[in-house]
Amino acid sequence: MKGIARDTVLEMFDRKMIWLFLIITLLAVLITLASGGLRVPIEEQSSQQGLTGLEGIKAAIIAPVTIAYMWILSLLGILGTAGLFPRMLERGRAEYYLSKPISRGSLYFNKMFGIFIAYFGVISLSLIVVYATLTLVHGSFSLRLLLTTIATGGVVFFIYLSIAICAGIIAGSHAIAIMTAFIIGVAQWALSGRQVIKQLVDSSLFSGILDGFYYIIPKTGEILDIGRDFALGRPVPSWMPLWSSLLFSLVVILVTIWIFNRKNY
Amino acid sequence: MNVIEIDRLTKIYETHMRRGNITALDGVSLGVGQGEIFGLLGPNGAGKTSLLKVLLGITQATAGDVFIFGLRPSNPESRRKTGYLPENHRFPNHLTGQGLLEFTGRLFGLPQKVIDAQSDRILPLVGMDRWANTKIRKYSKGMMQRIGLAQALLPDPDILLLDEPTDGVDPVGKMEIRQVLQKVREEGKTIFLNSHLLSEVESVADRVAILSRGKVVRVDSVANLTRKQSQYQIEAAIGNNLVDVPAESGKVISVSSDGMLVEVPNFEGLNKIIDLLRLRGVLIKSVKPLTITLEQSFMEIVAGGEVAEGETRT
């Protein structure tokens, strides 16, 4: 339903989010232009990455920078969009939306689609501009890296968006939606280093719990690693973090719709 | 045929606290016919807004059945031919008035041509054509109500559900909204009007349901509710004639040289009094049932309040 998607774009412009992304893009472009004078420690990088050839080495440096930029933008996107569902469903506004001849499931999917298209579209555009500048300054343009980074960012944005929307619908609060996404982000980061934690706490039960949480909670950090490896043409050690995280999002979406259908407004 | 059918509807809000549950609606049964202006009255907290929300599927019923055009509220198609103006609404304020109508039209799945034609027709009707391109956040309360009514009318609904439609509107605006409602009624559409402004309901509604503490305490026509059943104003040149009314026929409440107010147990008693006056050669000009305002009737029904004599009107 293009009405809701179009309305979400208008809402984004009205909330001046577009200006925030524009300012960040300009800053990133300026920093990239200023980085033209930096000398890349080629030998050190080549020994670390096991790469040969100047283009390959440059790509090995540019890839994490590009992915990190995408990750920052996705995080900002989540902060900017977490409040959209609670806002749509606040008293006096929920009545307007829910009195229309559309199901709540359809309203959910259309709004989520609208948010994704509007915000991730701007994020992708910003990445393209910054990556184009980066490769103009340093060379080593790779369409594979660009597309993989956009796809990786899209997956990460989608996962956190589904979590933020779920928390927003259940609690009806912008702050709780952001906090929940933040907590999941911290938890996945902590769980990615669970081997270190296991060494600190010598308990098989504790180890089992940590492993359980690790497999349940989305692994966005590892998805970014998968994206980087794939972009550089390296073998991906395991695709499990990707599909298990997407499965988590799917479950979250189904639970959210189930709760949304039963809520009174 | 009833376009709205409500059967033993109960709505209980669970608080999940020790404060206990809140029963907003308690076994409400109602039917609203095609082309009727139906008023829903009740004090604050009586359950009026809850009833509208259950009708539209915004809130779910705890027990009982609700149908709009024979469809349950859980079916989104039940809302296809309904327009709704919520109480204390907060429309997406990043839109202009025109933008709100376009967005509403899209949510109803209407083609752009229809949306444009409807907008061109409705905006002047509610007096908002001048402000169509102004953002909603800049609207006054009265303008918000007008644009709210416009979005409710946009899908050309067969049922218009209005929750406090004249809230915050100035007297001229109220009159204009009443005129719009009359026009909508002339088109054969049904209006379900929820208001605590009794004079407003009295002036437009055909039938009224009075809700109190979640229960329907009376459903009747406005004419019946505003008729003081047993009292009649007899306009007659009584002059200095003394009229003794037999107790079984009724009693005289007040008398003056140009008429009298009588209370009778039935029509027979009224006719006996008229016969008595005629026997004395009194010229009778008119006999009218004494009416009261809907507000007085409402107070009698809901609060059991006394109706002051001076407030009665014929």
Image: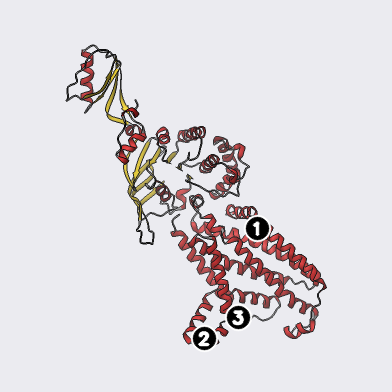
Distance between the Cα atoms at labels 1 and 2?
44 Å
Question: Within the image, what quadrant is residue A21 found in?
Answer: bottom right
State the SS at label 1: helix
Amino acid at circle 3: Ser
Amino acid at circle 2: Val
Residue B213 on image: x %, y % = 33, 47
Work out whether residue B280 or residue B222 is closer to the camera in this orientation and state it. B280
Instruction: Identify residue for label 3.
Output: A238
Name the residue at 43% across, 56% down. Answer: A264
Asked if the residues shown at circle 1 and circle 2 are in contact, with their CB atoms under 8 angstroms apart, the answer is: no
Which marked residue is nearer to the observer: mark 2 or mark 3?
2
Instruction: Identify residue for label 2.
Output: A201
The color scheme shown is: secondary structure
Q: Chain of mark 1?
A: A
State the SS at label 3: loop
Distance between the Cα atoms at labels 2 and 3?
27 Å
Earlier residue among tags 1 and 2? 1
State the SS at label 2: loop
Instruction: Identify residue for label 1.
Output: A17
Earlier residue among tags 2 and 3? 2
Residue B20 on image: x %, y % = 34, 58
